[in-house]
Structures are given as C-alpha cells and as structure tokens.
Image (cartoon, rainbow, N blue to C red):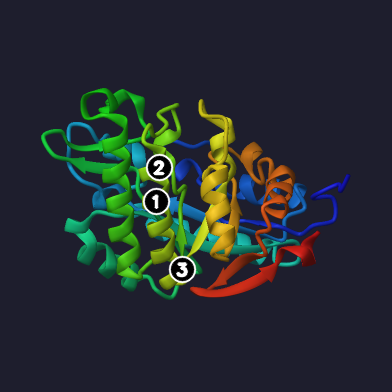
Amino acid sequence: MKNYGINMKLWDYHIHSRLCRHAKGNLEEYVKAAINKNLSEIGFSEHIPYEYLPISPNIPREEYGMPEKELQYYFTEIERLQAIFKDEIVIKTGMEVDYFEWSENEVIKFLEQYRDKWDYIIGSIHMIDSPNFGIWPVDDNRYSKYSEIGVDDVYYQYIEQLASLIETGEYDILGHIDLPKKNGNRPQNTKRYYLLMENLLDKIKTKEMAVELNTAGARKPIEEYYPDKEILRIISEKKIPMIISSDAHSPMEVGYDFNNAVALLEKNDVTNLCKFTKRKKELVKLNDLI
C-alpha cells in the first residue's frame, strides 16, 4: 500500500483564520501548522468582508466575515509572514467570495480594487435566495428552510445560483460544489440532480475553472468530502483540474485528511491538480506527486 503524503509536497488554499469571526487561530499559527504538515504552500482565503453580504434576518453577517476595515491588516500580515517564512513555505493570498447576482458588479469592483493582491479567488455559494423565504444559508441549521422548501428544490436553486457564478468568469476555483449536503440533506431525485451537476461541470470546463476536493465534509454530519463520489467521477471523466482543500477553521485542520484525498483522486483517475499565482493557473500531474 502506498504511504501517501510522507514525501509529497501538497498545498492547501482554503484556509480561514479568526479574522472571519467563526474560526480559531491567527495567520501565523496556520503557517506553522502547514510547515509541520510538510506542505509546500498555504493559501489564505478569508471570506469576503461582511459588508458585501446581504442584509437579512436569516444572515448573521458579522459572524460570516471580517469587516472591510480589517482587510489591510489581512494583506499586511500575509506579507509579513511571507518574509519570515520565505525559506520554509510559499504563502499565497486569496479570498472566498459568495456570489449573488444582485451584487455582482459591486463584488467585481471590490476584486478589481485589490487585483494586485490576489493569487486566486474561490467562488462559493453559502446562501440562496428562495421565493417566499428570502435569502438564507444552506449550511447553517439555525436558519434552515429545507423542510419548508423541500430538499430537492433547495438543490435546484443552489445549482442555478452556482451556474450564474460560473458564467461570470470571475473565479478561479469553485468551492464545496455540493455544500447543501453538509448537515445530512441529500438530494432525493438523484437522476435529475446528477444531470444538473453534469451540465454545471460542462460550464466549469468551458470557463477553465478548477474544482476543489474539500475534505471539510468528512468533519461534518455528512461525513464525506465535497464533492461526492459520483460528481468526482464526472469531474474525472471531463478532465477538470482539481485542488485539494481542507477548508480549515483551526490550525489543526490544515491539510486535513490529505493522504486519503490523494488516494481517492488516484482511484478515480483524476490526473491534474493545480496551483495559482497572481490568478495564473499551473497544472501539476498527480502522478508526479505520488
């Protein structure tokens, strides 16, 4: 049996610190954890400042991201750590951005304002806008609307919003592609669901985005990665590049379960991982890492 991870120099680009208000640890603690895990790179992807999230009774904005006034500290601290640890690890600057059609122009202006800072941008959907129920988070049980709307309809709305995100062409990586399952809500009409997912992945391929294999799902009630094995099979079939992410919210979660993630990708014939530098994608053959 292969001993994955002992000599591999992997990277983790989906990292949140206490700046986002729902994670633990400062940036330096995450960098040290990545070095201890033998990672070659770490990328910080704090959530977009909460001022860019919708105002809604179902959205506790100040729990979901930093205030914009702390953004400069985020950049400055990463630059400080890059200088300190330059001989030990590569540190990248990113952001995880929630997509809403109504705020698309405002968010694009925000990203453009700081374009010299970004190595990559993760596009994600955490909240959907449901008719008669407004905007609500699909992964926060405190505001769950699954029983009122119906699980399948939630997934259809979520996928529709993902499609709009992808069509913008503004994002490098698609985050946790099947997030609604996090707390155990699986789609019922699987035939239609996977057909919609396959169509979505065609759009991703056209836009030359990467999809993350996000290991955080294994730490959640669903106890499996994002995406599930069927979606992963389709990704492999379409030869869409992937990136392994921990979605860490504490330093101890950096590189979480990466050994098993690599084994899963190899089993499913995923050939390419990717890195990003200043929004430029570099493909890395998985076989070269094993």
Note whether residue 137 is visible.
Answer: no
In the rendered structure, find residue 195 and report the number of the disc placed on it: 1
The tag earlier along the polypeptide, 3 or 2, is 2
Residue 172 is left or right of residue 88, and the answer is left
What residue is drawn where x is 61% and y is 59%?
A: 81
Type of the residue with mark 1: Leu
Residue 280 image position (x, y, % from top left): 52, 76
Is disc 1 placed on a helix, strand or loop?
helix
Looking at the image, residue 245 sits to the left or right of residue 174; the answer is: right
Q: In the rendered image, which quarter contains the N terminus?
A: top right
Dot 3: within a 10 Å radius of its alpha carbon, few (fewer than 14), some, or many (20 or more) residues?
A: some
Q: Is residue 193 above or below residue 186?
A: below
Between marks 3 and 1 in the image, the one whose residue lies nearer the viewer: 1
According to the picture, the residue beneath numbered tag 2 turns out to be: 191
* Position of 211 relative to 284 (above/below): above
Is residue 284 shown left or right of residue 219?
right
Q: Which residue is mark 3?
A: 205
Marks 2 & 1, CB-CB < 8 Å contact: yes
Residue 274, percent from left and from top: 61, 66
